Amino acid sequence: MTKKQKKGLLRIGITAGLYAAGIAAEHAGWNGYVWLMVAGYVLISYDVLRKSAINIAHGEVFDENFLMSVASLGAVALGQLDEAVAVMLFYQIGEWFQSYAVSKSRKSIAALMDIRPDYANIEENGTIRQVDPEEVQPGTVIVVEPGERVPLDGVVENGDSSLDTSALTGESVPRHVHPGSEVISGCINQTGVLYVRTTRPYGQSTVAKVLELVENATDRKAPAEQFITRFARVYTPVVCGLALGLAVLPPLLFAQPWHVWIYRALTFLVISCPCALVISVPLSFFGGIGGASKAGILVKGSTYLEALADVKTMVFDKTGTITKGTFQVTDIQPADLSADRLLVLAAAAESHSSHPIAQSILEKAHKLPNQPLPAAGKVQEVAGQGVSALVDGSRVLAGNEKLMIESGIPADVLPEGSGMGTVVYVAVDGVYAGMIEISDQIKEDSRVALTLLRQYGLKKFVMLTGDNEQVARRVAGEVGIDEYHARLLPQDKVEILTHLLEQNKTAFVGDGINDAPVLAAADVGIAMGALGSDAAIEAADVVLMKDRLSQIVTAIAIAHKTLRIVRQNIFFAIAVKVLILILGALGLANMWAAVFADVGVAFLCILNAMRCLRVPVISLDRK
């Protein structure tokens, strides 16, 4: 509880005591009860009256402060001191609970904000010097002691340890790192001393990108929030006009008693206060974003949370998303060369590529005894097809069937793979030299995640891949994909996605390495396990910190729960308001009913909105 909240609670407590003493004094026949009520009213309402006066001076008349000030001062003028105090007291109780709910919903996001590093350790002449992380240049070796937060992204040069990544990913199991392991800023070093060579400046680090994303998360309003804002701007002046008409017209036109209709008009004003809608709807979305961040899911704004709940078609990249993206060479079929020579030539050609398939070929080649890789020159990467390089004076091509055919290799000399992996064909000086097959494994939770997503109303799953038809068909069949498209170039993926967007609200899920154009084009772009990818965090609307499809189910569940609570609050608040407004105009609802319609409804809606903070538990045991 904050200092301000404690003061507010104390003020509410003292006012409640003065109110109770005034009621008791009035029943005992002591005239001094009036001063107790006046003291209580001044104590509980001075800030509301002050805000109302300041807003009027700035031309901002119609808000809840104005409504509560007019209604309570009117009650005082009519001699209803007890009701004036009660109205303000319950209003302040509602405001206090709103403040408490907002601070509670900020907690999980505030936990993320704590990942900001205070310093970085640099060793100089055997001593450790602490510097600002923003001063550290890429390539600098920093020292991370046990218990300290990793300040910058880098690669471990020396040391073994376990990292607590829970603040970033929500994952409770520590991650073991050793020399060669990549580490990301924001994690906490738990055991051994680590020497880390930094790979990027602080401004481009994971922690800086995550903090920027979280800080801006509430800037993008969902359509439901925008509706409530527009509604309140029109609604408040209208009800003020109706209240004025209610107070003036019956006495003027029908000679009705003034005090009766003024009291009804004041009751009408208190009832009409739109606190429940104005407070609870944004609070629900804020709670949903906070709950998502607690689960390791960063949503860039409430507009994307609402869009996520409406998604009917989900499109997946294959490699690194549905599959693990950890490739292994499983078969080598040379033509006229030896298997080792074929592997060495292909590895040399692929030596400048960071693609997982290229890395698997390099890894296999490095394990060959006495087979050093020759240098590759004049390397040319053909997007979506493969690579061309000059190796030992020969032009080596390594890539898919399309690259071979466009380079003049007849299709009938290219053998088919087993269908269990990706085929890389190799040609030397325009002559087919052999085939290398690389297999990828499907993630354990892929099929279960898709089954659960269907239960949340998703109608269609589509997979887009640059891989061959056989591999695409096998993966799609194993995990339950409805439709797949193989042998795609990056621009082909955007074209297919554009067609799907015309049919339904569509989300695209990629690993963030080379999917930035498609992530940006989708209604909702979801980057999975992409904390290290600049393009993914920039282009995606939702960033999943864990490399698991099951997190998508959690994200969809949070979005559905948030939208359900928002709709419940809107329906409940409007229904109660309309009912008691009618009763108030007819004289069938007094100021106490008005207090319930304003503060009571707002309080119930706030409590309901706080349910958004609880992350739905997703069971992956269902098949």
Image: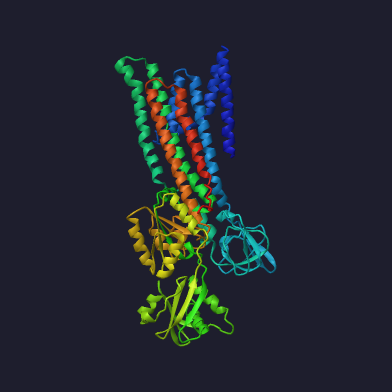
Q: Nearer the viewer, residue 295 or 263?
A: 295
Image-based side of 38 in relation to 464, left or right: right
Task: Assign the N terminus to one quadrant of the image.
Answer: top right
Task: Identify the residue shown where x is 54% and y is 79%.
Answer: 365
x, y (%) of residue 216? 47, 51
x, y (%) of residue 45? 50, 28
Can residue 212 be seen in the rendering of this structure?
no
Total label count? Answer: 0
In the orientation shown, which residue stands out farthest toward the top?
Answer: 29
Task: Identify the residue shown where x is 46% and y is 50%.
Answer: 556
Q: Nearer the viewer, residue 367 or 377?
A: 367
Q: Is residue 554 above or below residue 426?
A: above
* Residue 31 sits in quarter: top right
x, y (%) of residue 456? 44, 49
x, y (%) of residue 468? 41, 70
Can residue 258 be seen in the rendering of this structure?
yes
Image-based side of 456 in relation to 97, left or right: left
* Residue 55 sits in quarter: top left
In the orientation shown, which residue stands out farthest toward the left?
Answer: 253
Q: Nearer the viewer, residue 148 or 589?
A: 589
Q: Is residue 74 above or below residue 558?
A: above
